[in-house]
Every structure is written in C-alpha cells, then in structure tokens.
Image (tube, rainbow, N blue to C red):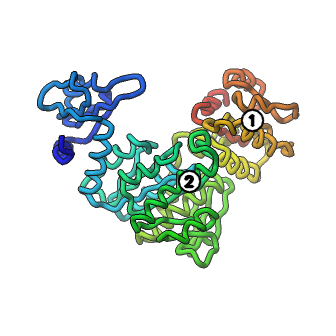
Amino acid sequence: MDISHIHNLFLKSTGVSIDTRKIEKNSMFVAIKGDRFDANTFAQEALEKGASSVIIDNKDYYIDDRTVLVGDSLVTLQELAKFHRNYLKLPIIALTGSNGKTTTKELINVVLAKKFKTKATVGNLNNHIGVPLTLLSFNKETEIGIVEMGANHQKEIEFLCEIAQPDYGYITNFGKAHLEGFGGVEGVIKGKSEMYQYLAKNDKLAFINLEDSIQLEKSKILKHYSFGVNRENADVVIADIKANPFVEIQFDSLQIKTHLIGLYNANNVNAALTIGKFFVVDNEAIKAALESYVPENNRSQLLTKGSNEIILDAYNANPSSMAVAIANFLQLEKLNKIMILGDMFELGSESQQEHKALVDSLKEETKVQCYFVGKAFYECQFSKENFHFYESFDSFSVGLKDVNFDNNIMLIKGSRGMALERTLEFIK
C-alpha cells in the first residue's frame, strides 16, 4: 500500500503503538515480529482494545478494512517515520556517542524547551525501532525535535540518519563501548562518524567539542559550531569547570551549578549550553534549565542512605566511562571511600584485557575499599588487603554482611546486566 495512504491513517490516529499492552484508543498498531513472537497474532486484540488500524505483514491475520497488509511491518514503520519527518519539515538535532547520550539529550531538551516547543527521544528508544517511534511522536506543534541514536555495529548510524535526516548533529565521544559489535576502538570511531559523513554530505551543521581530539580533527571538514574550555577559537568559550562532586561551569559571568556528578558530565553540560547559545536561548534561561535538571534511572545519582553518600551510576558501563567515573571519584575530597564495580559487557575478545587493565590501574590505591563483582573481574583477582572479588552478585550479597556501611562515600558502577542498584538494599 502507498506510504502516503498509511500516513493519512496515521494522522487521523492518536499515535503509533507496537505493544498491545499499551494500546490507546484510536491508535495505529504496527505488528513487528520479535525473536520470540509474531506480533501479527495480536492484530485482533489491538482492534478490540481500540486501535483504529493495524499494520500487518502476514495475510493470514487480515481482519477487515481496518487491517493494512504490507510486505514488512518494520520497514513500513521506518518508511512512515521518514515520510512524516519530511511532512513536518521541522529542524532535527541528532546525537550519538559512546557515553552520555541520554543525559546530553535530556539536557539539550530542557535548555531548548525554555524557548521552543521541543520533543525528544523518550528514555533510550534510540535504535532502528525507537528512532522511527520518536519521529512519529513529533507533530505540527513541535518546533525542534531531538533524536538520540544508539548503535553497536557499523552502518547503523548511517541508516538512522537516512531515516531522521538531521539538520544538526552531535557526537558525545568515541569510547570503548560495544567493542564486540564494532570490532575495536577504530570501529567505534568509524561507526559513530557515520553521522559526520551524513552531515557533510548534506551540508548540515555539527556541534563540536574542541576538547576531543577526534572531533577537533573532524571539524576541519564539517560546517560546525564549537565549544571549548578557554579556547579562543571556539564559538562558545567555557571559562572553567570543576566537580566536587557536582559539576559547576563558569560561562561569561554565569556560575552554573548542576545536579550532575563528575567531570565526565561536564562536556554533556557544555554541549547543551552550546546548543542553547546557537538557538539564541537567553543566558539566564540556560542557567535555570541546567540547574533544574536532576538525573534519574541510576544515572550518576547522588543518594543518601543513613550516614552514607552514594554515587549510583549503574545504568551502564564500558572501559571509557568506568575510567572517568573512577578518576572523578578518587579526586573527591572525602574519607572512607568504597567502590563497588561490576562487570562491563559487550567487550568481546577484549573483555579480559580491559577488566584486567582497570584492576591494574587501581593497584596503587590503598585507601579505597574496592569490591569487584562479576565473572570477568573475578578472573583478574589477586590478593590485596583492600581488594575484594566476587564471581556473582549473589556471592557479593553474602559478603556485604561484613561491610561497614557507616560514614562512607560510595561509587556503584557496572553494566546494566549487573543491576548493581540492588546493593542499595543492603545499606541500612
């Protein structure tokens, strides 16, 4: 069926759903096959729950004229999103990177929302399904769209850019994330840089962090708007940054005090500030937006339990984000430090090397109690008075009974699959 006809059905609906558990009245249900299910089988249920139309790609589940049969439901969702993006013709900012994508996206959104009607990716719906759903959440009232793009293989960012067709792009960094899929650090740089290639090919603008050597080099071939710390050649000059533990930024005559922990979050703040300046948001409004943002969902949260301060950063971890989180934690002017570090996933053949490198980097630290949790860290174990290794969270939870949780500052960080936020249950 012609995509314009499907788009007309979409415009008459209340939005797109791919989950019958979340069907809204008069919504459009798109039946996408999963690894363990065929959503075509839910077409009837979607209509019974109030969907106005259903998109299916298996003729055996055709019901009536409310059913639209297509060759591939996922491809149709992606084509519909691209068609809708061109229909709206609104400016779109896309961002990707190894670390800090979601936090940066949220910061950009709160800053630009001070002047514009913005919509941004919800949560981390940033893949080949999430990006189309984000685009389809934009409407005629949306003045700026903000699209987060995630990837763990080559050509994914290129594909997502072809769908979203961003006018502006930002890459947070090039770190050691998804090394297994990308094929090493060089593969990460190549994969993330697909956004730069799209921007250059289409004469679009990139936001550039001049503190990043890779971005600095790429800026030579891109139309760009830049930021840097005390760099006179930057479009936005940041005077000073510090974090003890919260990030503070000195910009012009403004002192911006955020609720974000760690120097590794400074560039996320600087990027949002810079994009706000590009879109001529008032300085005081930028300050108010950045100071009002409070992280959640286990992302660099500062919590208090009893007499303990806890930096909970258990949403994700890779060698790059782990290194900067640890470095920031060690420089804090606090006594009684405890680090609870969980395995880093998706590192492929480099997993053992990266986990061992992280453990080795802490060998000289004698005043911090270090708890390493997970099979990868367990294989790196050796005897050191302040080092403790556990093969699983279950064995760690038993060991927690012997930990003194009084007047400590703690860093809890690991990959999502480790779910280290469970540690909080053992802290009275």
Quickly name the residue at label 1.
406
Q: CA distance from mark 2 to mark 1?
A: 46 Å
In this picture, residue 202 sits left or right of residue 256:
left
Residue 23: image quadrant is top left
Horizontal and vertical percent position of residue 264: 63, 54
Identify the residue at horizontal 24%, vertical 27% (top origin).
46
Residue 340: image quadrant is top right
Which quarter shows the N terminus? top left
In this picture, residue 409 sits left or right of residue 6:
right
Identify the residue at horizontal 25%, vertical 26% (top origin).
58
Identify the residue at horizontal 58%, vertical 50% (top origin).
188
Residue 341 appears in the rendering: yes
Circle 1 SS class: loop
Residue type beneath disc 1: Asp
Nearest the eye: 244 or 76: 76
Quickly name the residue at label 2.
190
Q: Which comes sooner in the sequence, label 2 or label 1?
A: 2
Residue 390: image quadrant is top right
* Residue placed furthest toward the left: 65
In the rendered view, would you say 144 is above or below 353?
below
Identify the residue at horizontal 53%, vertical 53% (top origin).
192
- Label 1 Cα neighbours within 10 Å, binned few <14 / some 14-19 / many ≥20: some
